[in-house]
Structure formats: structure tokens, C-alpha cells
Image: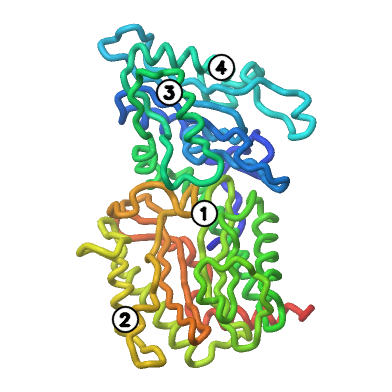
Amino acid sequence: MRRIHRVLPVAILVLACALPAPARQLEPNGAYAERRAKLLAQGDGPVVLFGYTGKENDSPSYVFNQEENFYYLTGHNEPGAALLLIPLAPNGKGNSGAHEILFLPPRDRMRERWDGPRIGPTDAGVKERTGFAEVKPFSDLRAELERAGKIFPRIYTLLPRDSDEGYPHARNWQNWLYQVLPQAGFRDARPLLGAMRQVKSPTELALIERAVELSIDAHLEAMKMMRPGIYEYEVAARMEYIHKRGGCEGEAYAPIVGSGFFSTVLHYNAVDKKIEDGDVVVLDVGGQCSGYAADITRTLPANGKFIARQREIYEIVLGAQKAVLAALKPGMLLGRGGANSLHKIAYDYINSHGKDKDGKPLGRYFIHGLGHHVGLNVHDAGDANRPLEPGMVVTIEPGIYIPEENLGVRIEDMVLITADGYKLLTARLPRDPNDVERAMAAGQASTPVQ
């Protein structure tokens, strides 16, 4: 799912000041300001969002990663912050005009001895660094909300969901908001934010392409080192190293390196099996760089050569992907239903090419969706059934998984939807089986067995 490091134009990206994420880069402050203005214009009341506190995960290995919607609007990657957007008051009553406030916790010098410097609300230059005309202590938030609550009947925030797991971030803050504004009508800001996040800005695309390029590099490295006798975790570790060496702060998801039977297990992440001669190996691995994810899958023959049955299934999956790409354009749907369903194109191709051991069609072995949006989350926010539009970044990932043959094949590429079709972001990484074999042979010839 990812690729090589590319030096990004200074005009597009600036180095982030926030710690501790390594090599994290930000978009210009103006890009975040434009999103805040667009969000505010779509609602009929103030918007209040809360960044993560750092308490969401108490593991010693945890590296802070901001709540995605908060990061999308602010670029702020430190714990304990809040954001308040206030529109013009109806009929101009009691409000000096639309404005936005970033609330930051006070500096804790002793804590910073352990965790590193933080930005404080009274720091010199804090407005220039954050891009906010108003930066206040977090303790001022309650008073500002109470003032807004007297003017506006509705407040937008991130409401809790039944699917929320782990630390109840949204539930905790919603309970606090009920105490502060018991009379307010709260609306969920997620649908508005999700719709915005699905269409990427040019500065977002630059960050996504950086993640993709580093992830491609990692997959090429895996092709070089792949051979029978090594362990799945060796491949995963090498790929993670390539990401980190290039500046990614981590993985977009737990690496999947599944060989033999485990090539048929979709979210296999034990990665502890020795890779055997004759296995195929599914590598679904991608880095997260500057908050943005990549998502790429390749299927490799462990010994560098597909046997006849492996090549047959591989070429069916590749044919299904090519059929989808031939139809890919704005207005098409990733979902299973509808006249413009790309999933149906892939399924029909798979179901009409090849048979299983019992002579039955292979459609029943394509058991997952065709693809998904990618951005600040590897399965990004927004309506998955929305027709595709220019600026969207999605995966195209047909697959066939036959457990009784220990044979799973998935080919996953990332595409940018354009006005008249698409751009294949992962084009540099081989997909054709002959190209895959050649890349593996070249790598193995130059890489000694260790």
C-alpha cells in the first residue's frame, strides 16, 4: 500500500512544530482555515470539537495521534486542545461576528521534561504558529460556550456512536457539554466533516502521495528479500523500517504478511509463520506519513515463480481490477448495488473466469468490498456509497481466497479520481505477474541470503 520518499515543495508543506510525531509535515495554515470556514458555512450554529487528551491509550508504546476531525481542521497534534467555531449571530444579536478560537492547555514544564515541549496559549508567536487569530486557555472554553449558547439554539460536535470502541472520548465530552449547555440542541458534525474529508485538497494529495511513495519503496524491498525460509515478521519488520526511515510516524494499520493458508485470512496479523517453498504471500502493508495513510497490497510467490494454479488465480484477480479501472470515473460507485457499481464489474469478471476444485464459479471466493476511501484514516470518513467525484482517493482491491487450496490473492492499488477518469497513484509498483517475477529475480540476485 505505499511508496518512496519524495521531497515536497516548501510552498506546499511546512515542517510541523508539534511533538512528538517524527518528521510530521503540515499543510499551510490557510488550508485548515479554509476547511473551518467551509464547515461553519454549512451549519446553522457553532461547532465545538475536542482533541484527544492523551489518556485514550495508556500503553507505554503509545505515540500520540490526534483525533482525525480535529486534526483535519487545525493541524494541531498535541493533547488537550479544543476548537470553537462561532458563526454570525442570527439578526446580529449579541455577537461581534463570526470567529474561531483554539483552546490550549497551560504549559506544564515538569511534564514537558518527560514528554517534550508543547505549545501553550500564551506562548510568543502562538497565533502565527497555529493560524488562529484567537488562542485562549482551555479553562476559558466554558464561558465562551455559555455565551454562544445564549444566542444559538444548536451546537455541532462529534456525538457518540454505538460503534465507538475503547476510551469513550466523544461520550465523555458530550456529557460535559450537557452540563454546560443543558438547553442546547446538539447536532452531529460527522456527516458534514466526512463529506468534506472525502474530497482531498492539493495539499492533502501531496501528503498522501508521500505516504504512497514510501509504501511502494517498502513493497519493492519486500520483493527483493522474499524467499522460502524467512519468517513473515522479517518481511513486515523490513517494510516498517523503510517507512520509518523515510519519515513516516508509523503504520496506517497492523501489517498483514500472510503466507500459505494465511494468504486467505483477510486481516491476518500474527505474522509469525515461516514462509515455505510453494507459498503465495499476501502483503497488505502501508505507512502513515504526516497523518495520512497509504493502503497497498501485493501477492508474491515465495520462491519468485508462480506455479500454474497460482498464476491462473492471480491473472483473474488482475483482470477484474483492470476491468474496474477501465470503467473508473466520476459518478461510479464502489458499492455492490446500482447500475454504476464497480464491485459488480469485479464480481462478474471473477465469477465468469476460472473454477474451483469442484468446477464451481469463483465469485463466492471474493468475500469483501471492492475498495474504500483513504485519507487521515485508512478507511476514511464519509458515506461509502457516495458517487465518486474528482479529488477522491480510493482503493481498488479485488481478491480471491480459496482456503482449501491455501491460495489467496489480493491486488490493491490507490487511485485519485480525476475529472475524466483516474490517476493510478501506485503505478510504480509492479502488478503484472511477469513484472512481479522479474522484480523479485532482480532483487534476489543482488541480495545475498542471510
Mark 2 or mark 3, earlier in chain: 3
Q: Which mark is residue 136?
A: 4
Give residue 351's mark.
2
Residue at left offset 38%, top offset 15%: 149
Q: Nearer the viewer, residue 54 or 285?
A: 54
Look at 56% across and 53% down and name the residue there: 210
The image position of residue 343, as x and y in percent, is 31, 67
Task: Give the CA separation, mark 2 to mark 4.
Answer: 60 Å
Which residue type carries mark 3? Answer: Tyr
Q: Nearer the viewer, mark 3 or mark 1?
A: 3
Residue 391 lies left or right of residue 345; in this view the side is right
Q: Relative to the observer, which residue lies in front, 396 or 173?
A: 173
What residue occupies the far left of the structure in this picture?
Answer: 339
Residue 348 to residue 333: above or below: below
Q: Is residue 22 visible?
A: no
The residue carrying mark 3 is: 178
Q: Residue at x 50, y 41 (%)?
A: 68
**Type of the residue with mark 4:** Lys
Amino acid beneath label 2: Asn
Could you tell me which secondary element the residue under label 4 belongs to?
A: strand
Whether residue 116 is situated above or below residue 141 in the rendered picture = below
Q: Nearer the viewer, residue 206 or 295?
A: 295
Q: Cα distance, mark 3 to mark 1?
A: 41 Å
Which mark, by number, is residue 356? none
Task: Provide residue 193's location: percent of width, then percent of height.
Answer: 39, 38
Residue to which mark 1 is pinned: 209
Answer with mark 1 or mark 2, whichever residue precedes in sequence: 1
Q: Tell me which amino acid carries mark 1.
A: Glu
